[in-house]
Each structure stands twice: as C-alpha cells, then as structure tokens.
Image: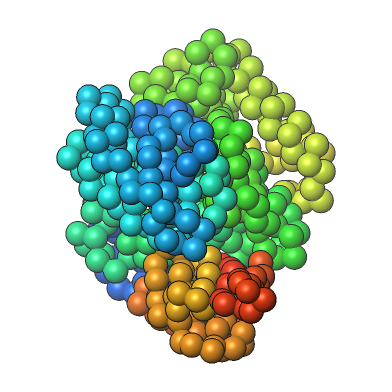
Amino acid sequence: MFTGIDIGGTNTDIALIDSDIRTIKVSNSKGLAQALLKAGDGGRLAVSTSQPLNAMVTGSTGRVRTITIPGPGLVHGGAVKGAVGPRGDVLEPVDTRQVEGLLRGCRADAVAIVGKFSVRNPVQEEIVRDIARQFFDDEQIAISAPLGGLNFPARIATTRINAGIKATVVSLSDQIRKTHPDFLFVTSDGGLCGFDRAIDNPSLLYHSSPATVALGAGYLSKKQDCLVVDIGGTTTDLVPIRDGKPVLQTLFVQGRRTLIQAVTADTIPLGGDSCIRDVLTQVRSGNARAFGGGEPTLTDALNVLGADIGDVSRSCCLDPAKAFEAYQYYLETLGAIIHRKDPGLIVGAGFLAPYLIPDLADEARVRYYVPEHAASANAVGAAVSRISIRIHARADSGRGILTLNGVDYPLPAGISDDDLLMYAGEIVRTQARKEGAPAQDLKELLTSQYSVYNVVRGGRTQARITDFVIGIAPGITAEAP
C-alpha cells in the first residue's frame, strides 16, 4: 500500500494506492489527526505540504536574525569574528562574546547561522548554535552546513528560509510521528526524504506541493508534455512537464539565489479561498463560506454562478455582479499568464479544476485535460514518489577526509576516481536504505559537477581534491502500481 497525504492551506488530501486509487479529502478545520486516522497505518506514508511555501508567500515566517562567519576582510550583515579555511582548517576562533552581544536582547523570531566554509568543517557554526540555544529553542535555529553547497550568498539566503520555516516543519513532524513514526516528506524536487533530513534542511520542502502535483498529474494523465494547473485554496501553481518529467531549476526567493533545487513552478497568490472584498484579493482568511468560513471567496462566487460546491446557501450573500467580476478577474489573470507560456495542453489539478479549467483553457486558448482523481493529484504524487538524495561531496586526500554535506567520512589512501564514486555512492545508498528506499530505486546514481584540483608544493603534488555532486534522482518509485 502506498499512501500519500498533501496538507494544503485549506484541505488535506489523501490518496491510497494499491491495485486501485482511492482518494479522501479532509477539511483542515477537522485537524491533521483526523486525516492521519483516515490514512490508516498500513504501507508507506509520504507527506507533501504547502504550509512552508504558504508561510513565505504570505510573509508570516517572522523576523530572522542572521549571524555570519565570513572570515577576515569580508563584509556581511551580522558578521562575527572567526574563520574556517577552504580545506576545513580553523584559521581564527569564533568571538563568543561578540555572538552573545548580538543575541542578547534580540527580538527576532529565529536565527540563521552561516559560516563561509562551514560545509568543509561545521565546528564554528555549531559553537554559535550552542550560544544561540541560550536564547532560542532548537526549532528557531538553522545552520548552513547540511546544505552542502559552497556558494556563500546562496547559502545565507537558504539558511534564512530554513530558520523561518523550521518551526513549521518540526511541528508537523511531531504531529505525524505520533501515529506514523517512519513517515517520509516530499521534497522540492519531487523526491522523498526522512523527517530528520527535512528538519536539518527544511528548505527541502519549500516547493514540495508543486513538485508532487507535477508527479501526480503526470501519473494520472500519462501526458508527457503539458502545463499542470493546480488550483489550491491559497495559490494556483503552474508546473511544466517535459518528456514526462517536471522541469527543475535553482530557486530565487525575494530576488536572492538559493541552493534549493526545485520543480519549476509559477505560484500565483489566488485560489479558491481568496477573499472577495469588493474585488477578488490575494488575502485568505479561512475557508469559503460554503465550507463554514466567514468571508465570501472565489469558491462562493462559483456557487453564485451556478456551481454546487459545499453548502451553496451560505454563498448566496455574495452579490452576483461581484461574483462574476471576481470570476472574470481570476480567468483573465491566470489566462494571460498561461497564454504567454504557450503550452500545447494544460492538465488540471486541485478541487476546483473541473469548475475552472474548461473556461480557463478557453481564456488562454489552449487544450485541456482533467484526469480522474485530479482533486487529489498532490496526494497521488506523494504516494508514488521515490526517495531522492542530492549530496555535495569533497574528497581531500591530504586530510584523508571525504565530506558529504558537512559530514566527514574517512577517505582511503590512494583511492581511484572510480572507487571514490563507488565509495560515496554506497554511503548515499546506505542513507536512502535507512529512510526506506527499495533496492529497485537505488540502481542508478547521478553524478554531476565533477572537478579535480591538485595541491602542488615544491613542484610535487601534495594532495588531490575532488569535488562532485552525487545522488538519487527524484521520480516515480519502481514499486508503484
């Protein structure tokens, strides 16, 4: 049994896949515990959530205090004295008094700690984290070493995201583990990861909902090239699929490059629960009136215009002219964006897909398809995903160390390039097995960004440094029905 749960801003969708597909929709007003109860306890559970993304979109993550350890001569906000060299050697100790001075009386909601070369040696980030624990709880503190990537500005931006959404991820993990201790999270590239990995690097989940809807819509529709239009309660996501796979990109958040590899998606802050206040707004204050909410929304507008969604009588307070205006505004706004992308086909997903996709396709002048179970495409995608891992590796023969995302392993002396890849690959496979990956999903490892640098002194090679990225690509698990 493969079970997928998608925790959206309005509803929690559940997909149970065995010989057939069964889907269940649970209002978030009933609580996550009710959804977990309906999911049962058999087979594998994978959870996708848009809550971290929604928190970023709506600006509700709170204030983040950034502390950087850039090293001598470099200027960054929140900088403190201390330095780790490019090979992981400690060149200057951290000024602990300076760190305490920055944190004492700090009114931030979370702390992001970033050292320039912490991915080669995280010791100074860990020292600052220990000090931060005197003022903040663990779920309010994020360090950058588990990210693995060397790009310092991108790592700062990503760690700030992690600090802002970590508490949300920890809270979700604690809730789910009460009934499903071995559950998996869906990551931003459409793969799966264990909750420990997600807590160390919450940005893995940042765009997970668009990732799962791409996999789910592709799995349900069998379409190889299309634009998935996922209409949620808070947002509408546009996710392209090419050659049967979602397109990946490096995310920029608030204009800053991050280290997040995510499914390409345009997120428009308009959805079924967007409030109508004279006009359709980007504000969400709860459910539609048709589902017990207090303010009329786009869903209520659909009811006024003839749909039959929830308690239609509660939608009737909305003026028909305003309902039509809100509906038209949504169609024109999304239709223009879709038309500019010029897809040959759009595949609808989300609860409102049957109601909105036909007219939206007409507005954008494209063909459309709404598959069975489209309302729960995110949950279906979560159910059939496979565990994926992307690790930044650095082998330093001079130090005898292989570093994988800030964690050191012994490096055998004289190891060849081929044996190095096999050695690192087996560590990746071991991690994936611990998270529950089946053998069929571990056969092929992807390696990229491979480079070798020889350290030469006195005309002789003293050490060989090899950098590469290795991992298991996201996709549909080989065990999926």
Q: Position of residue 90 (x, y in %)?
A: 39, 57
Residue found at x 66% / y 67%: 449
- Compared to residue 214, the image places residue 302 above or below, namely above
Nearer to us in this view, 252 or 49: 252
- Compared to residue 1, the image places residue 143 above or below, namely above
Q: Residue furthest top?
A: 278
Q: Position of residue 70 (x, y in %)?
A: 47, 43
Left or right: 50 as drawn, with respect to 455: left
Left or right: 437 as drawn, with respect to 304: left
Nearer to us in this view, 203 or 176: 203
Quadrant placement of the N terminus: bottom left
Q: Quadrant of residue 304?
A: top right
Q: Is residue 353 visible?
A: no
Q: Position of residue 30 (x, y in %)?
A: 27, 42
Residue found at x 33% / y 38%: 111
Colouring scheme, one of rainbow, by chain, secondary structure, one colour: rainbow
In this rendering, the count of numbered labels is: 0
